[in-house]
Image (spheres, rainbow, N blue to C red):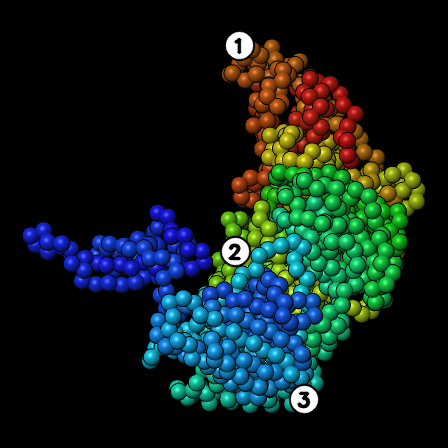
Amino acid sequence: MDSPNCGNNPIRLRVATVCSLAGGAEPVPYCRRTVQLRRTASVITVLATLLWLGQMPTIQTLSAQEPAGPACGTIEITLAGQPAPPASADVGGCALIADASGPQIAVLRPAGMFSVCVRAGEEVSLRMPLSGLSAPARIMADMRVRGDGEAEVSWTAGDQVVRQTVSGGEPRAMAVAMPPAAEPQLLRVTMRGVRGELAVRWQSWRCVIGDQTTALPPNFAAAVESFPPPVLPDPRPAIEQELIEWDWRLQDGIQTAREPRTWSQALELVLQRGDQLIENLLLASCPLDELPDQWEQLRGEFQALAQSPDAPESAWEGLWQRVHWLRREVALRNPVSDTGPLVFAKQVPSCFSHQLTQYYGMCARPGGGIFVLEAPGRSMRTRQLSTLPVGSYQHPEVSWDGRRVLFAYCEAPTVPPDRTTHPERVYHIYTVGTDGSGLRQLTDGPYDDFSPRELPDGKLLFLSTRRGGFHRCGAGPCPVYTLALANADGSDPRPISFHETHEWDPVVLNDGRILYTRWDYVDRHAVHYQQLWSVRPDGTNVAAFYGNNTLNPVGVWEARPVPNSDLVMATAGPHHAMTAGSIILLDVSKGIDGLDPITRLTSDVLFPESESPVQHWHAPAGVTAQPEVPVEQLRWPGHCYRTPYPLSADCFLAAYSYDELVGEAGANKTNMFGIYLVDRFGNRELLYRDLSIASLWPTPLRPRVRPQVLPSAIDPATAAAGEGTFFMQNVYDSWPHLPRSEADRITHLRIVQVLLKTTPHANSPRVGFANASPGKQVLGTVPVEPDGSAYFRAPARIPLAFQALDENGMAVQTMRSVTYLQPGEQTSCVGCHEHRSTTPDTMSVSLARQRPPSVITPGPDGSKPLSYPLLVQPVLDRLCVKCHSVPDAGGGIVLTGEPAGEFTASYNALAPLVPYSEWKGTPADNAEPLTHPGLFGARASRLTQLLREGHEGVVLSDEDMSRLVTWMDANALCYGTFDPADQKRQQQGEQIAGPALD
């Protein structure tokens, strides 16, 4: 069913319901109704409407131009005699019309309001075409005046001109008579500044015909998206007030489409949250002076108004405004909110919403810059620090002395058509003085460098794709970015993290360590495990900080330390979208996994993707009890916070969006984020919003206390050899606990290198049956002493995993994570993923410490580089193929080494007999999050059981068994490389040099 071609106008159907008289007479209409539907109404909507009428109807489709009543056509605007620029994009229906320096118009579309701000000598003219005036009409509107200036307002309709001179004071109204007409008539509204600055909010537009009053909402043309987004001037003070009050409306549900609230209902919640804020500040002895008394006076007015059933709406609205303005003043009196100027970035979110792609230059959309908000909470006046060509900006960071700003910039003159067309576009790191002088590029090359941080010793920490490699779990390319280090001037840039996949958001903790987010999905589910890790500034002593065995939230990003505290504030966000979600407070003294360490600071937003879907992306595995959906989330589905900056444990700066967070593979709304002052009690005050483009990463532009410089413990001797040492105090101090029977006694550790993925797409090619598996190769084994201790040398700068082996060389426990060493690093741990509540035994000297560090004993041939054809096939050729070869293979099992598909015949037959760890449908399908002993590899394999029971008299030597066990414990992989040519050589039984990237 096609809709009439009527542009943006609604469809109007005149419906005549009929009944047939006896004897075949003509149908006689007994009821006529006109039904108005949106132009986008579906066939189902239309049919449902007809059924509502109760009878089979006949339909006459009217012309879209036939009036259904008074209506306003699209308004034409001139500013200072020139056509106005298009309206900005909107936030919750609020848009701005303004040129660089002239008058400004705030359009508040859902409420049918707009506010015009002029200064002396400025003029604004609005041409409003009015249709549907079928009888003499009176057009009316109310005015609310802001500012201390004066303006002349006139309405012109035909020969009639109505004028008023307005200034601050009581609300006013205007009206003009208009005759009936078949064609639209023009009402011209003109506003000319006489002195000072003044804004008039026009509201309650209505048409009175006879005794009937019809709402007449003004109709402004919608914005057309363009890139880079139009540059808007800072809002004038009166327009600032409109933006702030409009934001309160959106928060409180005043006239919202979903979950609307009355003024009274809104006030009740505002008073409740304000009470908590005031109580908190008074307990902290904050000087609020007269504000608590004023607050109580307004509470009394609320109670009195609630007892007055005939109170006009204007009284409620007026009280609501005064309560909100007072609450804002209370929030700004909090000493921690007195930040001074804020530096922040304006940025269009990337063309592809995902945790990885959000920071690639090849996904950057043009627009934005680095700006300073001079007086947050008192003014929205800004100044720009950056003067680079059109591009994208992110991650501004203030130096410890408060004199410079670090940031990342990518030149991007156009919107990329997709995420792969412009690989040459990359982010580089820049520095600029806080006065805008001294702009300098610090990094270069074909790498994405971003998220800069100045270390306490002055060096530059950042994220970089210099490490090499790609992610493993989807379509690429998604180059890996990890922690990198450079001198203060950007020289000598180098990776200091050798993790096998991505890392995010490094920050210096108050104790001098680095905290960052790391994606740790080695042989685990790819959607979870973007959680917090710590490391020393020289890259040593990498350790899990929070969440490495946590499924809800899906991930934690953008962590920052709370001042004068061990607490950390961060964003609980999704995997399949850019970083945004709910702001949390972490106290790891209460645990390092699960919800116990978490305080939800923004309880109005559920954790995205786990507790609440992000479009169709939903990973609820860690949600044990579905929380109730907050009213705010029902009102603004998908609303979100990001880039928190803690001012205290209770109060913080953050970017916030009413617009829905878009998931992979879409692009988020250009202007979705504004900057707010937020507290844990639910109070949120708008500090700045550019209605044209998102504003992010608010950071106080002031000196900070520089944390201590942590000394490096690098040993020069082992550093020169490209090695470091590991010391494990007691392998049995593990979590989950290892079995302690004699048969389970740990005698060795197997050292496994986890390989970087060198090809851009998941499972292309595969290295084995395990889905999205990282490559592996076995470096060898080291002894574990009877007391459970181990001390050994290991190569530096490569990701390593350990396996605890029994006396038969089989893995009792396997590490589904990685660690690594810096050259010369000497690191230690208590046990095998020991519980963090464990206290190490410091009274006894471990046996392993009483000797020099062990040297790794290499594994069997074919284990490095890992090659199933070289490691396992020789055993099968000697003992098995005489019975298990075509055409008469025993049991139909072929154990020859001929290529068969991606792998070999014998690999295809034996690998399914080995329980291997992989990314499966849910974490529980893969025994996640915690790795329990004996679930994977040789110990749990049917193949091991078969061989132990004896099979057709086959007798395996110790070396034969070692080869089979090593292969099974290496996750039963086939190849030790992602390179297709090298895989083909391995498939043919040839030796290769090794992986292209360590």
* Three-letter residue code for mark 2: Ser
Give the number of the disc on residue 289. 3
User: Who comes first in sequence, dot 2 or dot 3?
Assistant: 3
In this view of the protein, which residue sits in the foreground, 709 or 733? 709
Q: Is residue 88 left or right of residue 48?
A: right
Q: Dot 1 corresponds to which residue?
A: 888
Q: Is residue 539 above or below residue 637?
A: above
Q: Is residue 707 above or below residue 528?
A: below
Give the number of the disc on residue 612. 2
Indicate the secondary structure of the residue bearing disc 2: loop
Q: Residues within 10 Å of mark 2 (few under 14, many from 20)?
A: many
Indicate the secondary structure of the residue bearing disc 1: loop
Residue at image coords 51%, 16%: 891
- Give the x, y percent position of residue 31: 21, 63
Q: Residues within 10 Å of mark 1 (few under 14, many from 20)?
A: few
* Three-letter residue code for mark 3: Asp
Q: Quadrant of residue 512?
A: bottom right
- Give the x, y percent position of residue 441: 84, 53
Residue at image coords 73%, 63%: 344
